[in-house]
Amino acid sequence: MKRFVMAAIGGIAGGVLITTQVTGPLIAQESGQSASVYEQLDLFGDIFERIRSQYVEEVDEAALIEAAINGMLTSLDPHSSYLPPRDFDSMQVQTRGEFGGLGIEVTQEDGFVRVITPMDDTPAMEAGVEAGDFITHVDGEALLGLTLEQAVDLMRGPIGSEIIITIVREDEPEPFDIAIVRDRIRLTAVRSRLEGNTGILRVSTFNDQTYPNLRDGLNDLIEEVGGIENLNGVVLDLRNNPGGLLSQAIRVSDAFLEQGEIVSTRGRQPEDGERYNATPGDLIEGLPMVVLINGGSASASEIVAGALQDHRRAVIVGTNSFGKGSVQSVMPLAGDGAMRLTTSLYYTPSGRSIQALGVAPDILVEQRDPIETEEDEGNPRRNEASLRGAFENSTLTEDQRLLLEEERATAEATAQLRNEDYQLAYAIDILTGLSALGPSRN
Protein backbone atom coordinates (compact mmCIF):
# COMPACT_ATOMS: atom_id res chain seq x y z
CA MET A 1 0.00 0.00 0.00
CA LYS A 2 2.84 2.39 0.91
CA ARG A 3 4.54 1.60 -2.41
CA PHE A 4 1.28 2.40 -4.26
CA VAL A 5 0.90 5.74 -2.48
CA MET A 6 4.49 6.68 -3.21
CA ALA A 7 4.04 5.78 -6.88
CA ALA A 8 0.96 7.96 -7.08
CA ILE A 9 2.71 10.86 -5.39
CA GLY A 10 5.69 10.40 -7.68
CA GLY A 11 3.43 10.57 -10.68
CA ILE A 12 1.86 13.79 -9.45
CA ALA A 13 5.24 15.32 -8.72
CA GLY A 14 6.50 14.32 -12.12
CA GLY A 15 3.47 15.90 -13.70
CA VAL A 16 4.09 19.12 -11.85
CA LEU A 17 7.72 19.15 -12.88
CA ILE A 18 6.94 18.55 -16.54
CA THR A 19 4.23 21.20 -16.53
CA THR A 20 6.62 23.71 -14.99
CA GLN A 21 9.27 22.96 -17.59
CA VAL A 22 6.86 23.39 -20.50
CA THR A 23 4.84 26.39 -19.34
CA GLY A 24 7.81 28.43 -18.13
CA PRO A 25 8.91 29.48 -21.66
CA LEU A 26 5.25 29.90 -22.69
CA ILE A 27 4.60 32.31 -19.83
CA ALA A 28 7.71 34.23 -20.76
CA GLN A 29 6.63 34.30 -24.40
CA GLU A 30 3.12 35.49 -23.52
CA SER A 31 4.59 38.15 -21.24
CA GLY A 32 6.77 39.31 -24.10
CA GLN A 33 3.78 39.45 -26.43
CA SER A 34 1.75 41.38 -23.86
CA ALA A 35 4.59 43.85 -23.41
CA SER A 36 4.75 44.31 -27.17
CA VAL A 37 0.99 44.91 -27.34
CA TYR A 38 1.17 47.48 -24.54
CA GLU A 39 4.02 49.21 -26.35
CA GLN A 40 1.89 49.41 -29.49
CA LEU A 41 -1.03 50.79 -27.49
CA ASP A 42 1.30 53.39 -26.01
CA LEU A 43 2.36 54.24 -29.56
CA PHE A 44 -1.28 54.63 -30.56
CA GLY A 45 -1.89 56.94 -27.60
CA ASP A 46 1.19 58.99 -28.48
CA ILE A 47 0.06 59.39 -32.11
CA PHE A 48 -3.48 60.29 -31.08
CA GLU A 49 -2.21 62.94 -28.66
CA ARG A 50 0.12 64.49 -31.26
CA ILE A 51 -2.68 64.63 -33.84
CA ARG A 52 -5.01 66.17 -31.29
CA SER A 53 -2.56 68.85 -30.23
CA GLN A 54 -0.44 69.51 -33.35
CA TYR A 55 -2.57 68.85 -36.43
CA VAL A 56 -3.00 71.95 -38.60
CA GLU A 57 -6.72 72.11 -37.81
CA GLU A 58 -8.73 71.19 -34.74
CA VAL A 59 -9.88 67.58 -34.97
CA ASP A 60 -13.04 65.79 -33.83
CA GLU A 61 -11.58 63.42 -31.25
CA ALA A 62 -14.55 61.05 -31.27
CA ALA A 63 -14.48 60.83 -35.07
CA LEU A 64 -10.73 60.17 -34.96
CA ILE A 65 -11.12 57.27 -32.53
CA GLU A 66 -14.06 55.89 -34.53
CA ALA A 67 -11.94 55.97 -37.69
CA ALA A 68 -9.13 54.13 -35.90
CA ILE A 69 -11.54 51.44 -34.65
CA ASN A 70 -13.07 51.03 -38.09
CA GLY A 71 -9.64 50.86 -39.71
CA MET A 72 -8.65 48.06 -37.33
CA LEU A 73 -11.76 46.05 -38.22
CA THR A 74 -11.77 46.67 -41.98
CA SER A 75 -8.13 45.55 -42.14
CA LEU A 76 -9.32 42.04 -41.23
CA ASP A 77 -11.68 41.34 -44.15
CA PRO A 78 -14.29 43.13 -46.31
CA HIS A 79 -17.18 42.27 -43.97
CA SER A 80 -15.88 43.23 -40.52
CA SER A 81 -16.59 46.83 -39.55
CA TYR A 82 -17.61 49.23 -36.82
CA LEU A 83 -21.25 50.30 -36.79
CA PRO A 84 -21.79 53.71 -35.17
CA PRO A 85 -25.19 54.17 -33.52
CA ARG A 86 -26.90 55.47 -36.66
CA ASP A 87 -25.64 52.59 -38.82
CA PHE A 88 -26.49 50.03 -36.13
CA ASP A 89 -30.05 51.36 -35.97
CA SER A 90 -30.26 51.27 -39.78
CA MET A 91 -29.07 47.65 -39.86
CA GLN A 92 -31.68 46.60 -37.30
CA VAL A 93 -34.41 48.31 -39.32
CA GLN A 94 -33.17 46.62 -42.50
CA THR A 95 -33.43 43.14 -40.99
CA ARG A 96 -37.06 43.97 -40.19
CA GLY A 97 -37.64 44.65 -43.89
CA GLU A 98 -37.77 48.44 -44.29
CA PHE A 99 -35.04 51.07 -44.61
CA GLY A 100 -34.12 54.22 -46.49
CA GLY A 101 -31.64 54.40 -49.38
CA LEU A 102 -31.00 53.42 -53.00
CA GLY A 103 -31.69 49.70 -52.71
CA ILE A 104 -28.27 48.20 -53.48
CA GLU A 105 -26.09 45.70 -51.65
CA VAL A 106 -22.40 46.59 -51.94
CA THR A 107 -19.02 45.24 -50.94
CA GLN A 108 -15.45 46.50 -51.29
CA GLU A 109 -12.76 44.97 -53.47
CA ASP A 110 -9.25 46.42 -53.46
CA GLY A 111 -10.59 49.78 -52.37
CA PHE A 112 -13.35 49.87 -54.98
CA VAL A 113 -17.07 49.68 -54.18
CA ARG A 114 -18.70 46.81 -56.05
CA VAL A 115 -22.42 46.18 -56.38
CA ILE A 116 -23.39 42.69 -55.22
CA THR A 117 -26.94 43.24 -56.40
CA PRO A 118 -29.65 45.85 -56.83
CA MET A 119 -32.71 44.85 -54.81
CA ASP A 120 -36.05 44.19 -56.47
CA ASP A 121 -38.35 47.16 -57.13
CA THR A 122 -35.96 49.75 -55.71
CA PRO A 123 -34.66 53.04 -57.18
CA ALA A 124 -31.30 51.42 -58.02
CA MET A 125 -32.89 48.60 -60.02
CA GLU A 126 -35.25 50.97 -61.83
CA ALA A 127 -32.31 53.25 -62.70
CA GLY A 128 -30.42 50.35 -64.32
CA VAL A 129 -27.75 49.51 -61.72
CA GLU A 130 -26.54 45.93 -62.29
CA ALA A 131 -24.78 43.27 -60.21
CA GLY A 132 -21.02 43.52 -60.75
CA ASP A 133 -21.00 47.28 -61.38
CA PHE A 134 -18.25 49.30 -59.71
CA ILE A 135 -19.25 52.65 -58.19
CA THR A 136 -16.31 55.04 -58.49
CA HIS A 137 -17.85 58.43 -57.61
CA VAL A 138 -20.86 59.78 -55.73
CA ASP A 139 -21.94 63.26 -56.80
CA GLY A 140 -18.49 63.68 -58.30
CA GLU A 141 -16.61 62.67 -55.15
CA ALA A 142 -14.21 59.74 -55.60
CA LEU A 143 -14.78 56.70 -53.39
CA LEU A 144 -11.27 55.27 -53.76
CA GLY A 145 -9.50 55.51 -50.41
CA LEU A 146 -12.70 55.59 -48.36
CA THR A 147 -13.88 52.76 -46.15
CA LEU A 148 -17.02 50.91 -47.19
CA GLU A 149 -18.98 52.59 -44.39
CA GLN A 150 -17.81 56.04 -45.53
CA ALA A 151 -18.80 55.26 -49.11
CA VAL A 152 -22.23 54.07 -47.97
CA ASP A 153 -22.64 57.25 -45.92
CA LEU A 154 -22.15 59.31 -49.09
CA MET A 155 -24.93 57.35 -50.78
CA ARG A 156 -27.35 57.96 -47.93
CA GLY A 157 -29.50 61.05 -47.80
CA PRO A 158 -33.01 62.46 -47.44
CA ILE A 159 -35.84 60.58 -49.15
CA GLY A 160 -36.69 62.30 -52.43
CA SER A 161 -33.22 63.78 -52.96
CA GLU A 162 -31.24 62.96 -56.10
CA ILE A 163 -27.83 61.35 -56.20
CA ILE A 164 -25.54 60.81 -59.18
CA ILE A 165 -23.30 57.75 -59.09
CA THR A 166 -20.53 57.03 -61.58
CA ILE A 167 -20.47 53.43 -62.79
CA VAL A 168 -17.72 51.33 -64.35
CA ARG A 169 -19.21 48.29 -66.07
CA GLU A 170 -17.24 45.42 -67.58
CA ASP A 171 -18.82 45.54 -71.04
CA GLU A 172 -18.88 49.36 -71.27
CA PRO A 173 -15.82 51.17 -72.70
CA GLU A 174 -16.21 54.29 -70.56
CA PRO A 175 -17.54 55.14 -67.08
CA PHE A 176 -21.04 56.62 -67.10
CA ASP A 177 -23.33 58.43 -64.66
CA ILE A 178 -26.68 57.25 -63.32
CA ALA A 179 -29.06 59.61 -61.52
CA ILE A 180 -31.12 57.99 -58.74
CA VAL A 181 -33.76 59.51 -56.46
CA ARG A 182 -33.43 58.21 -52.92
CA ASP A 183 -36.52 56.53 -51.52
CA ARG A 184 -37.75 54.49 -48.57
CA ILE A 185 -36.96 50.89 -49.36
CA ARG A 186 -39.75 48.51 -48.42
CA LEU A 187 -38.72 44.96 -49.13
CA THR A 188 -41.18 42.23 -49.95
CA ALA A 189 -38.97 39.33 -49.05
CA VAL A 190 -40.79 36.76 -51.23
CA ARG A 191 -42.99 37.25 -54.29
CA SER A 192 -44.97 34.27 -55.57
CA ARG A 193 -46.75 33.60 -58.85
CA LEU A 194 -47.75 30.79 -61.20
CA GLU A 195 -46.33 30.14 -64.65
CA GLY A 196 -48.72 27.53 -65.97
CA ASN A 197 -48.78 24.93 -63.20
CA THR A 198 -45.30 25.77 -61.92
CA GLY A 199 -44.91 27.82 -58.75
CA ILE A 200 -42.34 30.63 -58.84
CA LEU A 201 -40.99 31.84 -55.47
CA ARG A 202 -38.79 34.88 -55.94
CA VAL A 203 -36.79 35.44 -52.72
CA SER A 204 -35.11 38.86 -52.76
CA THR A 205 -33.62 38.94 -49.25
CA PHE A 206 -33.42 37.02 -45.99
CA ASN A 207 -34.99 39.13 -43.26
CA ASP A 208 -37.52 38.44 -40.53
CA GLN A 209 -40.31 38.26 -43.11
CA THR A 210 -38.73 35.73 -45.48
CA TYR A 211 -39.98 32.38 -44.20
CA PRO A 212 -43.51 33.61 -43.32
CA ASN A 213 -43.77 35.25 -46.78
CA LEU A 214 -42.57 32.06 -48.48
CA ARG A 215 -44.94 29.80 -46.55
CA ASP A 216 -47.97 32.03 -47.13
CA GLY A 217 -47.12 32.61 -50.79
CA LEU A 218 -46.74 28.90 -51.40
CA ASN A 219 -50.08 28.16 -49.74
CA ASP A 220 -51.73 30.78 -51.99
CA LEU A 221 -50.22 29.16 -55.09
CA ILE A 222 -51.41 25.69 -54.07
CA GLU A 223 -54.92 27.06 -53.52
CA GLU A 224 -54.85 28.93 -56.84
CA VAL A 225 -53.81 25.83 -58.81
CA GLY A 226 -56.52 23.73 -57.17
CA GLY A 227 -54.45 21.57 -54.86
CA ILE A 228 -50.85 20.44 -54.53
CA GLU A 229 -51.53 17.48 -56.84
CA ASN A 230 -51.93 19.97 -59.72
CA LEU A 231 -48.56 21.65 -59.10
CA ASN A 232 -45.68 20.61 -61.39
CA GLY A 233 -43.06 21.80 -58.95
CA VAL A 234 -41.43 24.95 -57.61
CA VAL A 235 -38.73 27.30 -58.87
CA LEU A 236 -36.92 28.99 -55.98
CA ASP A 237 -35.43 32.11 -57.56
CA LEU A 238 -32.43 33.32 -55.51
CA ARG A 239 -30.80 35.38 -58.27
CA ASN A 240 -29.37 38.70 -57.07
CA ASN A 241 -30.26 37.84 -53.48
CA PRO A 242 -27.46 39.29 -51.31
CA GLY A 243 -28.33 37.19 -48.24
CA GLY A 244 -29.24 38.29 -44.75
CA LEU A 245 -30.18 36.37 -41.63
CA LEU A 246 -28.67 32.90 -41.14
CA SER A 247 -31.76 31.84 -39.17
CA GLN A 248 -34.00 32.56 -42.15
CA ALA A 249 -31.73 30.67 -44.56
CA ILE A 250 -32.05 27.66 -42.25
CA ARG A 251 -35.85 27.94 -42.10
CA VAL A 252 -36.20 28.25 -45.88
CA SER A 253 -33.96 25.21 -46.43
CA ASP A 254 -35.88 23.27 -43.76
CA ALA A 255 -39.14 24.08 -45.56
CA PHE A 256 -38.17 21.63 -48.33
CA LEU A 257 -36.08 19.05 -46.43
CA GLU A 258 -37.31 16.17 -44.26
CA GLN A 259 -34.07 15.46 -42.42
CA GLY A 260 -30.30 15.86 -42.41
CA GLU A 261 -27.88 18.70 -41.88
CA ILE A 262 -28.61 22.07 -43.45
CA VAL A 263 -25.42 23.96 -42.64
CA SER A 264 -22.61 23.98 -40.11
CA THR A 265 -20.47 26.86 -38.90
CA ARG A 266 -16.88 26.53 -37.69
CA GLY A 267 -15.05 29.23 -35.80
CA ARG A 268 -11.56 29.70 -34.48
CA GLN A 269 -12.07 27.21 -31.66
CA PRO A 270 -13.59 23.74 -32.22
CA GLU A 271 -16.14 24.33 -29.48
CA ASP A 272 -17.45 27.39 -31.36
CA GLY A 273 -18.88 25.21 -34.12
CA GLU A 274 -22.63 24.81 -34.65
CA ARG A 275 -24.69 22.36 -36.70
CA TYR A 276 -28.23 23.00 -37.89
CA ASN A 277 -30.47 20.11 -38.93
CA ALA A 278 -33.75 19.85 -40.81
CA THR A 279 -36.98 18.87 -39.08
CA PRO A 280 -39.66 16.58 -40.60
CA GLY A 281 -42.05 18.22 -43.03
CA ASP A 282 -41.74 19.34 -46.67
CA LEU A 283 -44.09 22.15 -47.72
CA ILE A 284 -44.41 20.72 -51.25
CA GLU A 285 -44.38 17.04 -50.27
CA GLY A 286 -41.40 16.04 -52.37
CA LEU A 287 -42.40 17.78 -55.61
CA PRO A 288 -39.41 18.55 -57.86
CA MET A 289 -37.56 21.82 -57.38
CA VAL A 290 -35.20 24.05 -59.33
CA VAL A 291 -33.11 26.73 -57.61
CA LEU A 292 -31.94 29.67 -59.72
CA ILE A 293 -28.67 31.40 -58.76
CA ASN A 294 -26.23 33.85 -60.32
CA GLY A 295 -23.24 36.00 -59.38
CA GLY A 296 -25.47 38.20 -57.21
CA SER A 297 -26.58 35.27 -55.01
CA ALA A 298 -24.58 35.53 -51.80
CA SER A 299 -24.34 34.38 -48.20
CA ALA A 300 -27.74 33.10 -47.01
CA SER A 301 -28.72 32.40 -50.64
CA GLU A 302 -25.69 30.16 -50.97
CA ILE A 303 -26.56 28.33 -47.74
CA VAL A 304 -29.98 27.42 -49.18
CA ALA A 305 -28.64 26.49 -52.62
CA GLY A 306 -25.79 24.44 -51.12
CA ALA A 307 -28.08 22.55 -48.73
CA LEU A 308 -30.67 21.66 -51.37
CA GLN A 309 -27.92 20.72 -53.82
CA ASP A 310 -26.04 18.44 -51.41
CA HIS A 311 -29.26 16.67 -50.42
CA ARG A 312 -30.15 16.28 -54.13
CA ARG A 313 -33.44 17.95 -53.30
CA ALA A 314 -33.23 20.51 -56.11
CA VAL A 315 -31.52 21.05 -59.45
CA ILE A 316 -29.35 24.20 -59.27
CA VAL A 317 -29.54 26.22 -62.49
CA GLY A 318 -27.87 29.45 -63.56
CA THR A 319 -24.32 30.72 -63.05
CA ASN A 320 -21.79 30.52 -60.22
CA SER A 321 -22.82 32.31 -57.02
CA PHE A 322 -20.90 35.11 -55.28
CA GLY A 323 -18.84 33.05 -52.81
CA LYS A 324 -19.43 34.71 -49.44
CA GLY A 325 -18.97 31.82 -47.05
CA SER A 326 -18.32 33.74 -43.83
CA VAL A 327 -20.59 34.49 -40.88
CA GLN A 328 -20.60 37.88 -39.16
CA SER A 329 -21.63 38.32 -35.54
CA VAL A 330 -23.02 41.72 -34.57
CA MET A 331 -21.90 42.63 -31.07
CA PRO A 332 -23.46 45.68 -29.36
CA LEU A 333 -20.91 48.04 -27.80
CA ALA A 334 -20.91 50.89 -25.31
CA GLY A 335 -22.30 54.09 -26.75
CA ASP A 336 -25.12 52.36 -28.71
CA GLY A 337 -22.84 51.28 -31.54
CA ALA A 338 -21.88 47.75 -32.54
CA MET A 339 -19.07 45.71 -34.03
CA ARG A 340 -19.66 43.44 -37.00
CA LEU A 341 -16.97 40.76 -36.79
CA THR A 342 -16.35 37.70 -38.93
CA THR A 343 -16.43 34.86 -36.41
CA SER A 344 -16.85 31.69 -38.47
CA LEU A 345 -17.16 30.09 -41.88
CA TYR A 346 -20.17 28.06 -42.90
CA TYR A 347 -20.07 24.66 -44.59
CA THR A 348 -22.65 22.86 -46.71
CA PRO A 349 -23.91 19.41 -45.60
CA SER A 350 -21.17 17.67 -47.61
CA GLY A 351 -18.54 19.62 -45.69
CA ARG A 352 -17.49 22.08 -48.41
CA SER A 353 -16.73 25.70 -47.74
CA ILE A 354 -17.77 27.98 -50.57
CA GLN A 355 -15.76 30.97 -49.34
CA ALA A 356 -14.40 32.75 -52.45
CA LEU A 357 -15.59 29.79 -54.57
CA GLY A 358 -19.38 30.02 -54.57
CA VAL A 359 -21.94 27.37 -55.42
CA ALA A 360 -21.50 25.93 -58.90
CA PRO A 361 -24.81 25.20 -60.67
CA ASP A 362 -25.70 21.67 -61.72
CA ILE A 363 -26.68 23.09 -65.11
CA LEU A 364 -24.83 26.19 -66.29
CA VAL A 365 -27.29 28.53 -67.99
CA GLU A 366 -26.22 32.05 -68.87
CA GLN A 367 -28.88 34.75 -68.99
CA ARG A 368 -29.33 36.28 -72.43
CA ASP A 369 -30.74 39.54 -73.66
CA PRO A 370 -34.18 39.58 -75.30
CA ILE A 371 -34.07 38.80 -79.01
CA GLU A 372 -36.20 40.72 -81.48
CA THR A 373 -37.87 38.12 -83.70
CA GLU A 374 -39.46 38.46 -87.10
CA GLU A 375 -42.87 38.28 -85.42
CA ASP A 376 -41.91 41.26 -83.27
CA GLU A 377 -41.25 43.20 -86.46
CA GLY A 378 -44.75 42.46 -87.78
CA ASN A 379 -43.83 39.36 -89.80
CA PRO A 380 -45.93 36.39 -88.63
CA ARG A 381 -44.38 32.92 -88.46
CA ARG A 382 -44.97 31.00 -91.71
CA ASN A 383 -46.68 27.63 -91.47
CA GLU A 384 -49.38 25.66 -93.32
CA ALA A 385 -52.20 27.57 -91.66
CA SER A 386 -50.73 30.90 -92.82
CA LEU A 387 -50.77 29.96 -96.52
CA ARG A 388 -53.45 31.51 -98.73
CA GLY A 389 -56.26 29.07 -99.43
CA ALA A 390 -55.21 26.57 -96.73
CA PHE A 391 -58.22 24.63 -95.46
CA GLU A 392 -58.95 24.06 -91.79
CA ASN A 393 -58.81 20.73 -90.02
CA SER A 394 -62.48 19.73 -89.87
CA THR A 395 -61.87 16.59 -87.82
CA LEU A 396 -61.52 18.51 -84.56
CA THR A 397 -64.35 18.54 -82.07
CA GLU A 398 -65.22 21.78 -80.29
CA ASP A 399 -63.49 20.56 -77.12
CA GLN A 400 -60.39 19.60 -79.09
CA ARG A 401 -60.34 22.99 -80.81
CA LEU A 402 -60.58 24.81 -77.48
CA LEU A 403 -57.81 22.63 -76.05
CA LEU A 404 -55.63 23.37 -79.08
CA GLU A 405 -56.17 27.11 -78.67
CA GLU A 406 -55.27 26.82 -74.99
CA GLU A 407 -52.09 24.92 -75.82
CA ARG A 408 -51.15 27.53 -78.43
CA ALA A 409 -51.67 30.33 -75.90
CA THR A 410 -49.50 28.48 -73.38
CA ALA A 411 -46.79 27.94 -76.02
CA GLU A 412 -46.84 31.63 -76.95
CA ALA A 413 -46.59 32.66 -73.28
CA THR A 414 -43.71 30.23 -72.79
CA ALA A 415 -41.90 31.62 -75.84
CA GLN A 416 -42.36 35.16 -74.54
CA LEU A 417 -41.03 34.21 -71.10
CA ARG A 418 -38.05 32.45 -72.69
CA ASN A 419 -37.25 35.66 -74.52
CA GLU A 420 -37.69 37.85 -71.42
CA ASP A 421 -36.06 35.57 -68.82
CA TYR A 422 -34.20 32.69 -70.40
CA GLN A 423 -32.93 31.21 -67.11
CA LEU A 424 -36.40 31.09 -65.54
CA ALA A 425 -37.92 29.56 -68.69
CA TYR A 426 -35.17 26.92 -68.65
CA ALA A 427 -35.99 26.08 -65.01
CA ILE A 428 -39.70 25.74 -65.83
CA ASP A 429 -38.86 23.47 -68.78
CA ILE A 430 -36.98 21.15 -66.40
CA LEU A 431 -39.93 20.90 -64.03
CA THR A 432 -42.39 20.42 -66.90
CA GLY A 433 -40.28 17.55 -68.19
CA LEU A 434 -40.02 15.93 -64.76
CA SER A 435 -43.78 16.29 -64.27
CA ALA A 436 -44.43 14.54 -67.59
CA LEU A 437 -42.55 11.49 -66.28
CA GLY A 438 -45.06 11.04 -63.45
CA PRO A 439 -45.25 11.63 -59.70
CA SER A 440 -41.92 11.98 -57.89
CA ARG A 441 -43.11 12.46 -54.30
CA ASN A 442 -41.16 10.58 -51.68
Image: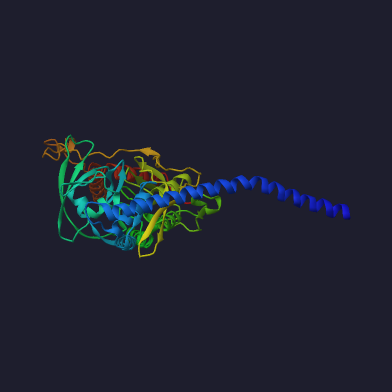
- Choose between 399 and 362: the one closer to the eye: 362
Q: Residue at x 18, y 57 (%)?
A: 182
Furthest residue in direction right, as rendered: 1
Direction from residue 404 to residue 37 in the image, left or right: right
Q: Is residue 367 above or below residue 38?
A: above
Q: Residue at x 24, y 55 (%)?
A: 153
Direction from residue 33 to residue 303 in the image, left or right: left
What colouring style does the render use?
Answer: rainbow
User: Image quarter for residue 339?
Assistant: bottom left
Percent across and percent down for residue 423 are 30, 42
Percent across and percent down for residue 109 are 31, 42
Q: Is residue 247 above or below residue 37?
A: below
Q: Residue at x 56, y 45 (%)?
A: 29
Q: Is residue 385 above or below residue 146?
A: above
Percent across and percent down for residue 433 are 37, 43
Q: Check the picture and name the quadrant holding the N terminus.
A: bottom right
Percent across and percent down for residue 144 are 24, 43
